[in-house]
Amino acid sequence: MPAGRDLPTIAISAPDADPRPGLSGVRSDALVAWAESLHVPPYRARQIADFHWGRHAGAAAEMHTLPASVRAALERDFQVDTLADTVVRPADGGLTEKALHRLGDGRLVESVLMRYPSRGRRRERTTVCISSQAGCAVGCPFCATGELGFGRDLSVAEIVDQVRFWARRVTEEGRRITNVVFMGMGEPLLNADAVVEAAYALTDPLRFGLGARHVTLSTSGVVPGIERLTALRPAWTLAVSLHAARGGLRDVLVPLNRRYPVTDVVDAASAYADATGRRVSYEYVMIDGINDTPADADAVSALLRGRLAHVNLIPMNPVAHTAWRPSTPARVATFADVLRLSGVPVTVRRNRGEEIGAACGQLAAEQAGEPASEAVRRRRDRLEREGAASLSRRP
């Protein structure tokens, strides 16, 4: 596995996809069965797992205690690492790092590492934000990933290997990954099979071994996916990208709202909270003059009051295809006060890594080239028209 070379660019080639499955997507019992098929002792499978999950090996050659024949078979049958190349950019004095990963077929995805020092009673945390798709089909206009469009779903191994990349990097610092959030590129619950399996791999004591309560799955409102999670009743945290409580405005900001209306999304999320006892996190990107008005604050309060919920207010990261800008600190504070007075818990988040484009899709969009100015103008005009129309309507 590449160690994260600090390079100015990353090649965007499109070789044929590697037919070998990624080792990170192989369950422990399947690995044992593979070892048995080679007529080697089962403990060899445990050795492989220790190198892969405990030491985050990136190649079979690193598993030096295995016989050469087993290493050769492993390399023949599996991709020990599905990340072909990686560029890392640091920010926030080294507290934040963003990686642009190239997959085996040339697709680009992003992940972010955020280091949080201990503070008071709060322990030191090391959080990784990972992608579940190359691009995204939802098309939220304030998100740089939406500018790229949808490429494809990621496999279980491609999702998990993003975490292993950072685990290997921070191990050298004497740190470990404490939290994983599925909030990178893509809509996780539109790739639910792989995302659920990846979350199980990350929380399996025989594999990555992260505590289930330290995994967060985000969605912009895929109701069937939320219902599936409710049936599974995991201890993972559910995060809903809310961004507006008024239906007409959310149609613009989160186009998926036209298929799954916000009231249905919140009802499904509340059912998840009731089934698991886990508070739902609602993410709310603050856009100046668009969704930060008193009417919007009242609508969020009415929607979430009395539910097992917590709202995170996040200033928008500017992107090329919209003229929108983040809400001012004063407007964010006023919005937060309205929620608190109504009994809805709220936290104002500070953006991390702004100087390296740490918002989803910004590095990949940069590598893909800036969109044509005329295309940017047309999209800006359309979004401004739709936004103005939505703002003129009552909740």
Image: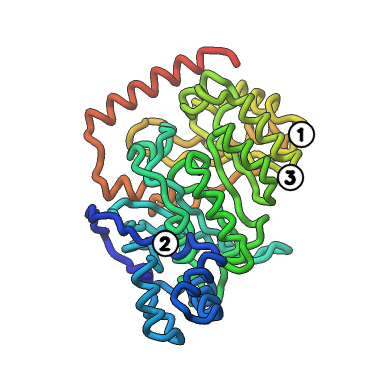
Q: Which-is-in-front pick, marks 2 and 3? A: 2
Q: Residues within 10 Å of mark 2 (few under 14, many from 20)?
A: many
Is 24 on the left or on the right of 239, as rendered? left
Residue 374 x, y percent position in the rendering? 22, 28
**Who is closer to the viewer here, 248 or 193?**
193
Quote the CA–CA distance across marks 1 and 3. Answer: 22 Å
What amino acid is at disc 1?
Gly
- Badge 1 vs badge 2, beta-carbon distance below 8 Å: no
**Who is closer to the viewer here, 393 or 199?**
199
Q: Which image quadrant: the C terminus?
A: top right
Q: Which residue is mark 2?
A: 22
Q: Residues within 10 Å of mark 3 (few under 14, many from 20)?
A: some
Q: Which mark is residue 276?
A: 3
> Which residue is located at x 66 percent, y 61 percent?
211
Tell me where residue 218 sits by quadrant. Answer: top right
Residue that lies at the very extreme toward the top in this rendered image: 393
Is 328 on the left or on the right of 269, as rendered? left
- Counting residues from the start of the chain, the first of labels 2 and 3 encountered is 2
Q: Residues within 10 Å of mark 1 (few under 14, many from 20)?
A: some
Secondary structure under the numbered disc 1 in the rendered image: loop
- Counting residues from the start of the chain, the first of labels 1 and 2 encountered is 2
Quote the CA–CA distance across marks 1 and 2. Answer: 46 Å
Secondary structure under the numbered disc 2 in the rendered image: loop
Q: Which residue is mark 1?
A: 343
What amino acid is at disc 2?
Gly
Q: Check the image and report above or below for 46 versus 239.
A: below
Q: Which-is-in-front pick, marks 1 and 2? A: 2
Q: Which-is-in-front pick, marks 1 and 3? A: 3
Residue 77 x, y percent position in the rendering? 37, 68
